[in-house]
Amino acid sequence: MFLALLVGAGAGGGAIVFRWLIRIFTEALSGHEDYAGLGAVANPHVPWLGRWFVLLAPVVAGLLYGPLVHFFAREARGHGVPEVMFAVARRGGRIAPQVAAVKALASALCIGGGGSVGREGPIVQIGSALGSTLGRLVKVAESRMKVLVACGAAGGIAATFNAPLAGVFFAMELILRDFNTQSFGMVVLASVTASVIGRAALGDQPFLKLPPFVVDHVAQYLLFAVLGLLAGVVGVVFSRVLYAIEDVCDKLWRGPEWLRPAVGGVLLGVVLLVLPEMYGVGYPVLGNSIAGRYAIPFLIVLLIGKMVATSLTIGIGGSGGVFAPSLFIGAMLGSAYGQLAHELMPGVAGQVGTYGLIGMGAVFAGAARAPITAVIIMFELTGEYTIILPLMAAIVLATGISHLLTGDTIYTLKLRRRGVDLDVPEHAGLLGSMTAAEVMEPLGESVDQGTALLDTAGRLARSPHGQLPVVDGAGTYLGIVTARAAADALADGRHDQAPVAGFVEQSPSVRADTTLDASLDALETAEGTAIPVLDESGRQVLGWLSHQRVLSALSTSRQPDSSS
């Protein structure tokens, strides 16, 4: 609990510093606190450049953060969350301590220089690195290290977005990928601590200040459902576009990696020159779309522009998150959809802004497939509870259509492209290639079902696992008898000559051709130290499978080749 509080406090402080860095670099490189909502205006620091300064801002930023990332923490490149997921799933929660500082500087420079990315990925990685560093300092167990990493992620989200509940569910649903009660309690403590610190420094206002929205016609639920399906498709398309553009950038670039963000910054500058609304995170533009200030064609242009600008920023080696861009894309989609619905069915469609809000949550759910996080974070970012029912319906539908279209999320796809599948245990490849028959130990003795219990006791005392298989006259396997059951029955002195058939138990068992990966599940449920291995018909018992035999097989298979 104490460590969770420390991590939460560190993540809260880190979020404050990170947001301050973004503001400082944005003002330094654009001359404004947030350039995105201003249109094509000049940078007051270099007024003689006019609107053309956007061609230089990404280049200058890239020259600064490119070498920083390349030489000090290469895992700080990209959107951050997949790296944290990989650290928890495959590295025991270990994250290099310098990642926090490098990620904060690199992402703040990238966003300040016009990179069209979000701040949630960086703050998740920053908070997680702090949690991992603290865990290594005090030498906690691996399981607790993972929880501290999740605490850091939750604290970062909570403090950055003033969303303590969203921070908790983001960490549990995406980082730990498990809802363990004890872990949940620790993550909540960290999130609350970070949120209190964040609110003290950044205020207690909702992320978006909006007028109240209401659902005033039951037919609107059908419109929201269709929007949810569309948003799920758009979320998947965003994922594919992101990695397609990254692949193109990888294929075209032949120079040193540290120079890639600066050279690629020229292309990003061209996009910003055409669409200055793509500069940085773009929250003012998002708010304008919800308020209905853009026409449908321009909303579609902004939607496509954000996909391209975010993908290009990541593809050239930028550092920043994809959560905010998915919200942006969803707002454009929902607002355009709402305006169209209002024109076609003015008496039914209702307020346009409602569709924009629902589109935000649904596109994120379609891209990340984190429905609980999507519902909670939309509620906390907007403070709007009146649309919670259509929001939940649209998010669930978006998640469902995303499942149908692809097996990956915007986060796991990055890892799968490296050959990492988080849904498959790390040891599954080796265990999946070996069968129970290859590993099992010899059967030893078996007991006929008619044997007296007292006679069986001696054999049980000599058996290595305290249990014996029971067979009938034809040798058909019936079950097992255990030393514990025999001792309990013999203790009263009335069952000495009772046939062992009356004490047969049905133990978990596996077939000879069952892989070790699947056999481990049966071993987990077994009360004894070993389980029977049966032939393909399930009638004959062939041997025993124990954890010790599995470990021995794994150890032998990993011995280095003496000839190499």
Image (spheres, rainbow, N blue to C red):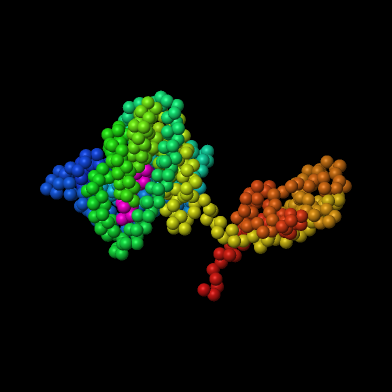
Residue nearest the viewer, comparing 140 with 508: 508
Say whether residue 108 is visible: no
Tell me the residue at 31%/55% (across/down).
Answer: 316
Query: Where is residue 26 drawn, in percent x and y?
Result: 23, 44
Tell me the residue at 82%/45% (across/down).
Answer: 502
Left or right, 299 with respect to 432, comes to left
Query: Where is residue 131 drawn, in percent x and y?
Result: 41, 46
Question: Is residue 464 part of the magenta span, yes or no?
Answer: no
Query: Where is residue 148 drawn, in percent x and y?
Result: 44, 44
Residue extending farthest to the bottom is 563
Question: Is residue 319 part of the magenta span, yes or no?
Answer: yes
Residue extent of the magenta highlight: 312-326
Above or below: residue 3 compared with residue 139: above
Tell me the residue at 55%/59% (across/down).
Answer: 429
Tell me the residue at 44%/28% (across/down).
Answer: 219
Query: Where is residue 364 drawn, in percent x and y?
Result: 40, 42
Left or right, 169 with respect to 517, comes to left
Above or below: residue 338 compared with residue 236: above
Say whether residue 51 is visible: yes
Residue extending farthest to the top is 216
Residue extending farthest to the right is 497
